[in-house]
Image (tube, rainbow, N blue to C red):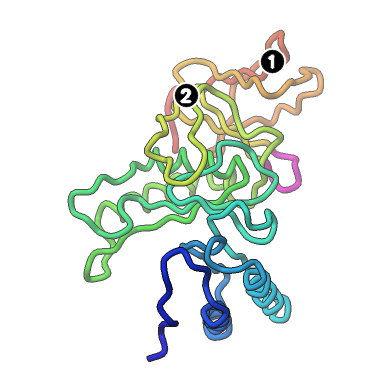
Amino acid sequence: AGLYCRPRQPGSPPTKQYMNKWLGMVNEVVDKYQPDLTWFDFGLSSVIAPEYQRRMFADYYNWAAAHGREVGVAHKHRNIHQYTGILDFERGREDRLTPYPWLTDTSVGPWFHQKSSRFKTVNELADVLVDIVSKNGCMLLNVGPQADGAIPDQGKQLLRGIGAWLKINGEAIYNTRPWKVFGEGPTGNTGGGFSENKDKPYTSQDIRFTQSKDGKTLYVIVLGWPQDEVMVRSMKVDAAAVDAHIELLSGGRVTYRINEQKQLVIQPPAQRDG
C-alpha cells in the first residue's frame, strides 16, 4: 500500500526516502485539509533532520501567507528554534512567565474513555487555565469520547461548568496578555511535560494576573475563595492617582483600600458569584 518505508535498525538515522515521504505527507494534509494548527506528538526534533524541519515550516507558513491564514505548528522540543513553532507540554506547563507563547495539552480525565478514571473538577480546570494564560500559554483540552462517540456525562458536566465560569470571567482570559509578573502566592508548579500530577492545589493566597491588549485593564484573579482581605503585593499604588474603577467581573463594585506600603487591599464580597 506504500504506507511504510524500508525497515531500519533502532537508533539509526532516518533515510532521505523516509524524510521526503514524511514531508510530502505533511504537505498533503495541509493542501487537502487546510489546518489552522499542525500538532506533532512524536520526536520531530530527534527523528526529522533540521533541513527537513525547516522545509516543513517554510512550506506551511508560505502556504498560510499565500492564503491569508494564521497558522501554527506545535511541538514538544525546546531545541527547535524558539519562535519557529509553539512549544507544547503534554499534561504539564511552564513554571514561569515566558516571552513566547506556548501550549498545554491535557484532558478532563483520561485521553480515552475509561469508566473508573478520575476526572478533574471545574475548580481545578479553571485554576490551571488561569495559571497557563498568566504565563503566556494556551490550553488545548481533550474530552475522551465513549466507544459510540458520545461525550461521557462527567465530561459534559465539566464543560458546562468551565463554560459557566468563563461566561462570567472570560474577559480576564480571552484576548488578554500577560502582565509584568504572572502572579504571586505560596503555591507554584513543576515545570515541563507530564508534571501536573505533582502539583498542589492552589489557595486563596495564590493570585494570577492578566491584562487587556491595550494595557488599560489589569485582571487580578484569586485562585481560592478568600475569607479575609486580599493583599496584592506585586503592585505599588499611588492612592492620589488611583482611578477608583475596581469591580468584579460578575458586576458590582469592590471595597478596597491602599495600605502604608502602597499595596492594594481588597475586601471580598460575602458571597461568591462565579
Residue at image point 55% right, 41% down: 94
Asked if residue 21 is positioned above or below residue 266 in the image, the reply reads below
- Whole-percent x, y for residue 119 in the image: 29, 46
In terms of depth relative to the viewer, which is nearer, 128 or 25? Answer: 25
The residues tagged by marks 1 and 2 sit, at their Cα atoms, a distance apart of 20 Å
Asked if residue 119 is positioned above or below residue 241 in the image, the reply reads below
Q: Amino acid at mark 1?
A: Ile
Q: Tell me which secondary structure the magenta stretch mostly adopts.
A: loop
Q: Secondary structure at mark 1?
A: strand
Residue at image point 67% right, 77% down: 59
Q: Amino acid at mark 2?
A: Ser
Report the side of 101 relative to 111 (left or right).
right
Q: Secondary structure at mark 2?
A: loop
**Disc marking residue 204:** 2
Quickly name the residue at label 1.
258
Q: Residues within 10 Å of mark 1 (few under 14, many from 20)?
A: some
Residue at image point 33% right, 57% down: 111
Asked if residue 22 is positioned above or below residue 115 in the image, the reply reads below
In terms of depth relative to the viewer, which is nearer, 30 or 140? Answer: 30
Snapshot quadrant of residue 221: top right
Asked if residue 230 is positioned above or below residue 40 in the image, the reply reads above
The question of residue 214 being in magenta is answered with: yes
| Closer to the eye: label 1 or 2 | 2
The quarter of the image holding the N terminus is bottom left
The question of residue 192 being in magenta is answered with: no
Magenta segment boundaries in residue numbering: 211-217
Q: Residues within 10 Å of mark 2 (few under 14, many from 20)?
A: some
In terms of depth relative to the viewer, which is nearer, 234 or 213? Answer: 234
- Whole-percent x, y for residue 108 in the image: 35, 50
The quarter of the image holding the C terminus is top left
Tally the numbered discs.
Answer: 2
